[in-house]
Image (cartoon, rainbow, N blue to C red):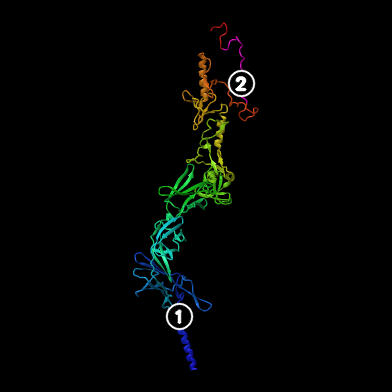
Amino acid sequence: MTRKIILAGAAAFALAALALTAAYFYIPGGARLVFGEGDIRICLNADGTAELDWPEARPSSRTETQDGGGEDAPAGEAAGPRITPVLYDLELTSESGHTQKLENHPRILLENYTLPMTIRIRAVAEGKNLLGLFRRLASQELTAEVRFTDLKAPEAVGTPGPGALSLSWKLSGQVPGFYKIFSLDQTDGVFRQVASTSAKQISLDVYKEGGTLVLPSYEHPLEVLVRAAVQGEGYVLCGPASNLIRVERQDLLGDDLNLVCRETEPRVYTLEWDETRGERYELQEWDKEGWTLLDTLELAEHFQYDLGRLGSGSHHRFQVVSKSVNGAVLSSEEAEFSVSIDPLYATIWPIIEQPFYEKADKSSSSLGKIPGGTALCVLEESGDWFQVRYKDQYGWVDSRFCMINLPEYVGDHCSYDITNSYRSIFKVHENPIALITDQVVQGFEHIQEADGEFLVPYLYPCAKKLLSAAQAAEKDGYRLKIYEAFRPNEATRFLYDTTAGQLELAALVYSYEDAEGKPLGQDEDPRVLDPVTGWEAGLEDGLLIDPETGEKISREDLALREAAEAEEAAQEGQGEAPAVPDPDGQSMMPAPQPGDDFPFFTLPEEGEGGLDPAEAPQPAPQPDLPPEPQEGEPQEGEPQEGEPQ
């Protein structure tokens, strides 16, 4: 019995000892250190130093396999917070027997060394076991017997191009096994290997991200060098570096701007383009005069230009031009687009007094009424309702009873020329009308704005239909032009009454010759003549211009003046009234006399015009003429035979 107790106690003690041992040796989260793939690399420098680097070691977890053994997880996986940073035991032994021990990171500059040389590297770290005690961890040893090889520095040439750098080099002396290409890492100032080749030339891709080479910044150029190399057992020996190849960012850029336009919000647009060669970029916009400079942008790695909110339906054309230092164009690209249709911020006018509601619903609370013709701004559209601000209140009006300014809604899908607002084109049979033709029609005084654009009110439901028609016309290669969309009652009344007041007068005519009968120039407006007197007439006031004095006179005053002159001439025995030139200025015709009846217009010659002779207006009836005097009979006004002379 005692023996069993002793054996049981011994077994318990042994198990406890094993548990303590396991607790001491076991470190949660990491069982060993593992080097990454690769060899020890020694890069010789021309100044007698050498750069030594090796694969980085990381803690790794052990995973159990089916045979009961273990395997290391891929190097580089994090092992947990119980492992301190990894350090390295480095031992260098030269042929002379000199040994140097160092503890450092996986890169070191050797100032005193000789080849051949033996290199031994072990990674070490500390971790806490289950007992909370620190325990030292060590990796397997990396070993290399580095032999002496006489390697020379290559002579390299770099040729940059869009997105690539081509390298070529030549090397005298012993032919190495291959070549290593290194690039300076701007983050830590260390040259890192980026490529390897057995040829004497290579082309390396350069990208902003993820390429063999990373596109350098404007502050720091790309720096590349080449080393000849030989492969040994467990190591790579690289000879002295070639001349340094420096390449500026601009030299690696192409000429493809890839200009695009994005609508980030309703009617809010942004231009974006890629970086290209050049010293500056010019953003230009097309207008009636051609390309105009909108902005100049200096060099940058990314370009985004906010155009802001653009007018509904407006058409735009932009161009980005890349220029060199001396102003030469290196590349250019255009973007052309039409803005989406949206009544937001357009001007509207209720056509009649409109109820003003708190919400877009007739059953909501009333905020009053808005008088017809009140100019409002659309803040939001919901169904058949516009939200507007009126007298510091925000509410809704029925859009079906509102006119909208077409240029602010339809935009450039139509063109606009409201001639009544600056120079009307009303005529009768191509004859000008005094006080109307080439005038600002009453009621249209404020339709043309200071910038030359027009206010073009049109009923909103009709504007939607007009937009569909305009877009259909555009597909067929046409464009609708609006000369008038709304005519105020004041204008209608003025046009009717002013024209009616001139129905008894002869229609004015155009003359394309000057006062001396010479043809007018192409840029000169035709002269307006009164066909009865042959005098020039002013369209702005309807008055005639006396060719002798240059004074203006009305037809009524001219008739009274000529009647007085005729009466005076008759009293003096001169007989006929003074003559005035006819409309064509070639022959003379008697001046109008009181009581004469002149037609409103004359009929066209046979074959002219489009009127049916049966439907054409007939000239006013002429008074019966007295019979022709017989030969020998005295003429009227002549003394009778026997009467005193």
Where residue 531 sits in the image (x, y, percent)?
54, 25
Q: Secondary structure at mark 1?
A: helix
In this orientation, which residue lies closer to the viewer: 469 or 403?
469
Q: Secondary structure at mark 2?
A: loop
- Magenta stretch: dominant SS? loop
User: Which residues, given as a range, are shown in magenta?
Assistant: 618-636
Where residue 614 sits in the image (x, y, percent)?
65, 27
In this orientation, which residue lies closer to the viewer: 641 or 258?
258
Asked whether the residues under the numbered discs 2 and 1 touch, taking CB atoms below 8 Å apart as contact, a structural biologist would say no
Label 2 – label 1 distance at C-alpha: 139 Å
Can the viewer see residue 370 in this picture?
Answer: no
Question: Residue 389, which numbered label?
Answer: none
The residue pinned by badge 2 equals: 622
The residue pinned by badge 1 equals: 23
Where residue 11 sits in the image (x, y, percent)?
48, 88
In this orientation, which residue lies closer to the viewer: 82 or 88?
88
Mark in the foreground, 2 or 1: 1
Q: Which amino acid does the dot numbered 2 rest on?
A: Gln
**Residue at horizontal 53 percent and vertical 78 percent from the top:** 67
Q: Residue lying at the far right in this picture: please name it.
A: 614
| Quadrant of the rendered image containing residue 167 | bottom left
How busy is the neighbourhood of tag 2: few (under 14 within 10 Å), some, or many (20 plus)?
few
Where residue 250 sits in the image (x, y, percent)?
42, 54
Is 480 drawn above or below residue 191 in the view shown? Answer: above
How busy is the neighbourhood of tag 1: few (under 14 within 10 Å), some, or many (20 plus)?
some
Q: Which amino acid does the dot numbered 1 rest on?
A: Ala
In this orientation, which residue lies closer to the viewer: 407 or 60?
60
Q: Residue lying at the far top in this picture: please name it.
A: 642
Side (left or right) of 478 relative to 7: right
